[in-house]
Amino acid sequence: EVQLVESGGGLVQAGGSLRLSCAASGFTFDDYLIGWFRQAPGKAREGVACITFSGGSTSYADSVKDRFTISSDNANNVVYLQMDGLKPEDTGVYYCAAVLSLVLRLDAGAYDYWGQGTQVTVSS
């Protein structure tokens, strides 16, 4: 069974940092595009960052550029999202997702597999 499991969410003050992890089971991330998305209450799901697992190419939403860093650990089949300089508007449920593709994209509809999400709350 294909599963994605996120971890690392929590409550942090504005300006703080968190690192989210996305681990896969039932398949390996090779040849997959892995994306991080977030959803705030009452808002649409928003693409944050994505990475081609094998090649390491990345793309970011403008709202998180220079603050968030996506990376991959090929040996352990894990993708990370390092979030620095957090702002209250970064609050939401963060999801990782995967699709068998090497094209960088941040539209949620393109992704086939989703994790259950992890809550990130940034207080002001």
Image (cartoon, helix red, strand yellow):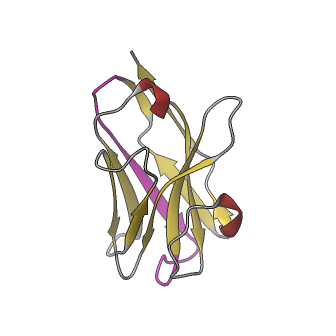
Q: Where residue 83 sits in the image (x, y, percent)?
A: 33, 43
In the shown orientation, is residue 104 left or right of residue 115? Answer: left
Residue placed at 61% from the left, 54% from the top? 115
Question: In the current view of this chain or complex, which residue is farthest to the top?
Answer: 124
Q: Is residue 62 visible?
A: yes
Q: Where residue 104 sits in the image (x, y, percent)?
A: 50, 73
Residue placed at 36% from the left, 82% from the top? 55
Q: Is residue 112 visible?
A: no
Q: Quadrant of the C terminus?
A: top left
Residue placed at 50% from the left, 78% from the top? 28
Give the answer, above or below, for where 67 lies relative to 55: above
Residue 14 among those drawn in magenta: yes
Q: Where residue 60 sits in the image (x, y, percent)?
A: 42, 57
Q: Quadrant of the N terminus?
A: bottom right
Question: In the current view of this chain or complex, which residue is farthest to the front?
Answer: 62
Which of 62/22 is in front? 62
Residues in magenta, as a range:
13-32
Residue placed at 41% from the left, 41% from the top? 8
Displayed quadrant of residue 76: bottom left
Residue 50 among those drawn in magenta: no
